[in-house]
């Protein structure tokens, strides 16, 4: 056993800062979107690429980031990820065109895909010697996620309202530099010999990007147009190639045998649908607040704080305890159904609505559903995997969430645009478009909830509702 690192708790602060920033990167831009749209000339349909460019790069390359962490050394990959994230932030902040902005966001996503898996590897190396310390470390590391989401919503409003939208990217530069300066606290991890499945990484990322691109363009060029059909066929072919490559190469990014793990498939389906419902809700709610209700960036960020605070409280305090009593299956299925109810409530928004009546109660119900479902889904995906494959199972379920988010946002943007959401300044048309998106998101969440309750195998729980100790401990450690 290696010697205990005396600076491990200081090192944990560096890793938690990384988790905080990676999650904040997905939330801080939300309230800045309308201002970016005005300055850079995004169309209503193109605006989603500010989010999707990051998500596609991040989700598509997570497995590769984990593999590189094993081969090159986790600290080296962690450091490289921060350099890439800083570079992408500079490009995004300085962008004067739609194309440059999207490229900057994609580069940020690449950085995040290097940072996230290497940070988890380093955390396990620092605290894996002591289960009690590991539990505390995981709790602190996990709490950085909802904290980052909450801070992103608030800071995005502050920067956009009183400075300018580029500051939502500029903030990563000083924090990134400070993190790089502190990487000496992290253990130096030697890499190991092995190959890199570059073809698999390129195939899955390109296939996902092409699928989203086709769905985004379809309302403009037609779903039955030659371009849309060919793009979707090519996307399916690339994703099929990914699975063929995984079966053929000696050291694949995702060994297909992992799918024999009990409940991994059903948990990943639930996670895909959760992302496909939740992220579009957050995206369109931001637009409704600013483009229909006329909120400024700071007001919009403040309006979303109750929802994010509820998420943080439930994910860090309550959900793991409920999971220990009830098991994962009812929380996943029930949480998705509660999310569906909140989304259906949001679909009743009015052009002359108010925050207190049209947004606050429904958004809190939706956030409650998300907070009930997310952690149990994550833990279910990982619980059946052997210890040596836990990291792979975690990477897969994180990837499916990002994939679901990107495809869900693309599809529901197409729905919203077809129902009037592209008519800026026409409040009834905008509201109809956003309402349609909420309805379809509710159907996605309801499908996930019903599928989980009907098809997922139950966890090892007694009739009294007690789960096995190992599962309970895992849930408490992963409570984020």
Image: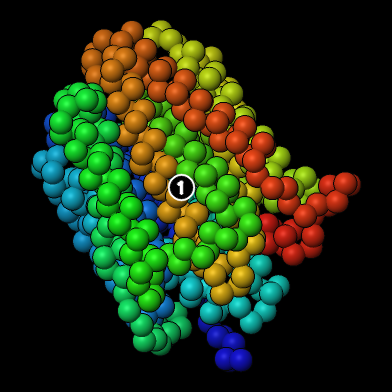
Is 275 on the left or on the right of 378, as rendered? left
Is 264 on the left or on the right of 289, as rendered? right
Where is 19 relative to 213, above or below? below
Specify the farthest residue to the left: 96
Colour convention:
rainbow
Q: Quadrant of the N terminus?
A: bottom right
Q: Which residue is mark 1?
A: 401
Residue 225: give x, y in percent of width and height.
17, 27
Answer yes or no: is residue 364 visible: no
- Element on which disc 1 rests: helix
Residue, x 65% and y 44% (percent of image)?
456
- For label 1, the crowd category at 10 Å Cα-Cα, with few meaning under 14, some 14 to 19 and many 20 or more, is many
Residue, x 46% and y 47% (percent of image)?
401
Nearer the observer, 332 or 124: 332
Residue, x 33% and y 21% (percent of image)?
416
Nearer the observer, 381 or 190: 381
Residue, x 39% and y 86% (percent of image)?
192
Residue 393: give x, y in percent of width and height.
52, 62
Image quadrant of residue 373?
top right
Image quadrant of residue 21?
bottom left
Nearer the observer, 298 or 25: 25
Nearer the observer, 426 or 401: 401
Residue 175: give x, y in percent of width and height.
34, 62
Residue 64: give x, y in percent of width and height.
35, 66
Answer yes or no: is residue 409 visible: yes
Where is 252 relative to 279, above or below? below
Is 194 on the left or on the right of 323, as rendered? left
């Amino acid at each position: 056993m290696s010697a205990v690192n005396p600076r491990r708790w200081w090192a944990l602060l560096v890793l938690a800062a990384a988790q905080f920033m990676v999650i904040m990167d997905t939330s801080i831009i939300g309230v800045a979107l309308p201002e970016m749209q005005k300055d850079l000339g995004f169309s209503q349909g193109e605006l989603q690429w500010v989010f999707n460019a990051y998500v596609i790069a991040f989700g598509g390359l997570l497995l590769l980031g984990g593999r590189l962490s094993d081969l090159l050394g986790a600290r080296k990959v962690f450091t490289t990820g921060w350099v890439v994230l800083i570079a992408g932030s500079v490009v995004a902040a300085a962008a004067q065109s739609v194309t440059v902005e999207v490229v900057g966001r994609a580069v940020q996503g690449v950085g995040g895909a290097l940072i996230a898996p290497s940070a988890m590897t380093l955390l396990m190396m620092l605290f894996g010697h002591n289960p009690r310390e590991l539990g505390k470390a995981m709790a602190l590391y996990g709490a950085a996620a909802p904290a980052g989401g909450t801070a992103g919503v608030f800071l995005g409003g502050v920067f956009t309202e009183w400075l300018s939208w580029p500051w939502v990217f500029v903030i990563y530069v000083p924090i990134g530099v400070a993190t790089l300066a502190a990487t000496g606290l992290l253990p130096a991890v030697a890499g190991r010999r092995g190959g890199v499945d570059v073809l698999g990484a390129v195939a899955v990322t390109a296939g996902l990007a092409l699928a989203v691109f086709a769905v985004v363009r379809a309302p403009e060029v037609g779903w039955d147009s030659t371009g849309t059909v060919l793009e979707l066929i090519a996307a399916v072919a690339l994703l099929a190639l990914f699975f063929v490559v995984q079966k053929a190469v000696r050291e694949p990014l995702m060994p297909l045998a992992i799918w024999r793990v009990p409940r991994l498939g059903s948990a990943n389906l639930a996670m895909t649908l959760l992302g496909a419902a939740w992220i579009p809700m957050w995206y369109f709610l931001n637009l409704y607040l600013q483009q229909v209700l006329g909120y400024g960036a700071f007001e919009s960020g403040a309006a979303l704080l109750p929802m994010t605070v509820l998420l943080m409280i439930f994910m860090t305090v309550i959900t793991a305890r409920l999971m220990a009593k009830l098991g994962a299956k009812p929380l996943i299925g029930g949480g998705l159904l509660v999310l569906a109810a909140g989304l259906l409530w949001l679909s009743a928004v009015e052009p002359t609505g108010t925050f207190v009546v049209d947004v606050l109660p429904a958004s809190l119900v939706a956030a409650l559903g998300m907070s009930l479902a997310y952690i149990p889904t994550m833990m279910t995906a990982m619980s059946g995997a052997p210890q040596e494959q836990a990291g792979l199972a975690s990477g897969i379920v994180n990837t499916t969430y990002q994939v679901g988010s990107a495809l869900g946002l693309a599809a529901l943007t197409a729905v919203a645009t077809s129902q009037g959401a592209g008519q800026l300044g026409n409040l009834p048309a905008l509201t109809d478009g956003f309402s349609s998106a909420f309805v379809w998101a509710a159907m996605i969440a309801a499908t996930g909830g019903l599928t989980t309750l009907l098809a997922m195998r139950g966890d090892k729980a007694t009739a009294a509702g007690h789960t096995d100790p190992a599962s309970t401990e895992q849930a408490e450690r992963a409570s984020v």
